[in-house]
Image (cartoon, helix red, strand yellow):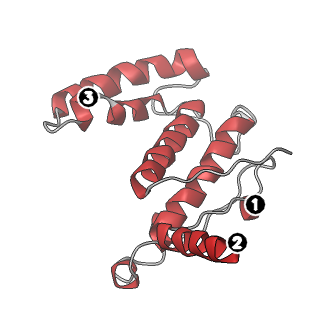
Amino acid sequence: MTQYRLTLSSQQVAVVRDALELYARLRMGQLDEARHHVPATTGVKYDLKASHILRDRLLELVPIATGLGPNQYHSLKSGEVSPAARIAWDIQQVLRYAMWLARPEAERQKYPPWWVFARPPDRTSELCCLPDLEVTSEPAARKEAIARRQDR
């Protein structure tokens, strides 16, 4: 299998994590999650009324898109959900946890261990093996790059 290696900043990792989470949620039928990613609800001025209108309109589409009723969606492990959604979910979990581990220890201590960011990833896809996904924080990556230069 071909493997790829990406080097991303913390901000870029956050964008990729959020995009993968949204993709997985949309594939499960959680169409109303899209309302959190449009200008009216992400800009400097959050428009609560627009958010509610968007939610209601998106929920109207759920039966057409999924065959389910409003406020219903498929479980991530449902046979109706594509393997790609599970892979996206697994990768975003790894990124989310890596971002959590990159925080200073004192900051991590402020949150309970059951907090979603503090939990190690759970595998949901047979096609995505979590131990094969490696994420290193910027300081660790810098140390690795320095060590490689010194070995030359």
- Which label sits in the foreground, 2 or 1? 2
Residue drawn at point x = 48 percent, y = 73 percent: 139
Mark 2: secondary structure: loop
Q: Which badge, 2 or 1, comes first in the chain's sequence?
A: 1
Residue 3 sits above or below residue 119 on the image: above
Is residue 76 in view? no
- Which label sits in the foreground, 3 or 1? 1
Give left or right: position of 46 versus 56: left
Instruction: Kindly identify which residue carries mark 3.
Output: 39
Distance from the alpha carbon under mark 2 to that under mark 1: 27 Å
Say which amino acid is labelled 1: Asp
Instruction: Kindly identify which residue carries mark 1.
Output: 132
Q: Which badge, 3 or 2, comes first in the chain's sequence?
A: 3
Distance from the alpha carbon under mark 3 to that under mark 2: 48 Å
Q: Nearer the viewer, residue 45 or 4?
A: 4
Say which amino acid is labelled 2: Arg
- The answer to whether mark 2 and mark 1 are in CB contact below 8 A is no
Q: Nearer the viewer, residue 82 or 18?
A: 18
Distance from the alpha carbon under mark 3 to that under mark 1: 36 Å
Instruction: Kindly identify which residue carries mark 2.
Output: 152
**Quarter the N terminus occupies:** top right
Q: Nearer the viewer, residue 130 or 86?
A: 130
Residue 46 sits above or below residue 108 on the image: above
